[in-house]
Image (spheres, rainbow, N blue to C red):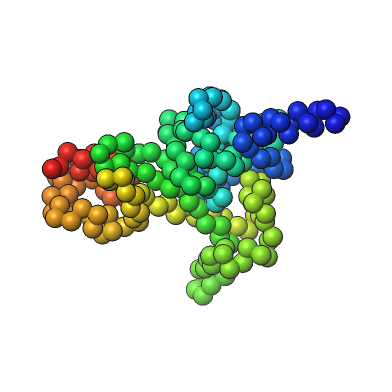
Amino acid sequence: MKRIIAIVLITVIITGISGHLSGQSNQDGSMPQYLFGEFSKGIVKMKKGQVQTILMNYNMVTEKMVFIRDEKYYDLVNPELVDTVFLNGSRFIPAGKVFYEVLVSDPVSLFIQHKGNLLPAGKPAGYGGTSQVSASTSLSSITLSSGQYNLKLPSDYIVSSTPLFWIRRDNEMYSFETEKQFLKLFPGKEGIIKAYMRENRLRFSRPENLATIVRYISTLK
């Protein structure tokens, strides 16, 4: 038994991961804290050249890559050792302790930081409506640890997606959430960019449209 435990610990150290409790899904099979509807085969390319293929997903609440092994969930806790993760046709790169999805790799590059807030499902409000309060004010009431965010969430909580976009230009990173903030990153070109968006019926709110806009900006002098 001791030998088996030792082997497991060595595996954890080599792969740079830390295990958590086994998990479960909601009754409809969904786990709303995850970016994708289900776990699928992902490829992890390490900076030292090793490549691993394993069932993966991305937890928007903890902003960690999660994988399944032996029906248990594990967080990828050392992203600095990772070069790239390929998952569901998307490419992710480490950025500090989280991962960014790469949308455009041009002179002007575009990334999306997938984030999610844990919110109460809704409390009764006036005129038959419901109100939601940021979970940051009430997480202590459900005492969730980091690992438990990979498990089934309490039935009275939901996840609200709050993505943050990043532009890399001249080796500098700039974040933005709104169209106004985005346009300010390209002083003197706002009019040209707006005209291009109108002519091509591109919506800032759609990541695929935003990627098209950024590719166009890379062609501007």
> Which residue in the rendered view is the most extreme toward the right?
1
Tell whether 100 sits left or right of 217.
right
Percent x, y of residue 195: 13, 49
Question: Which quadrant does the N terminus fall into?
Answer: top right
Relative depth, front residue between 25 and 127: 25
Using the image, determine if residue 130 lies above or below residue 204: below
- Tell me the quarter of the picture where residue 123 sits: bottom right
Is any part of residue 29 visible from this angle? no
> Which residue in the rendered view is the most extreme toward the bottom?
126
Instruction: Determine the residue positioned at 43% across, 43% down.
Output: 100
Instruction: Determine the residue positioned at 71% across, 40% down.
Output: 22
Question: Which quadrant does the C terminus fall into?
Answer: top left
Instruction: Determine the residue positioned at 49% across, 31% down.
Output: 47
| Tally of marks | 0
Tell whether 211 sits left or right of 58.
left
Percent x, y of residue 173: 34, 49
Tell whether 176 sits left or right of 214.
right
Relative depth, front residue between 221 and 49: 49
Percent x, y of residue 39: 57, 34
Percent x, y of residue 50: 54, 24
Is any part of residue 172 visible from this angle? yes
Instruction: Determine the residue positioned at 18% across, 56% down.
Output: 187
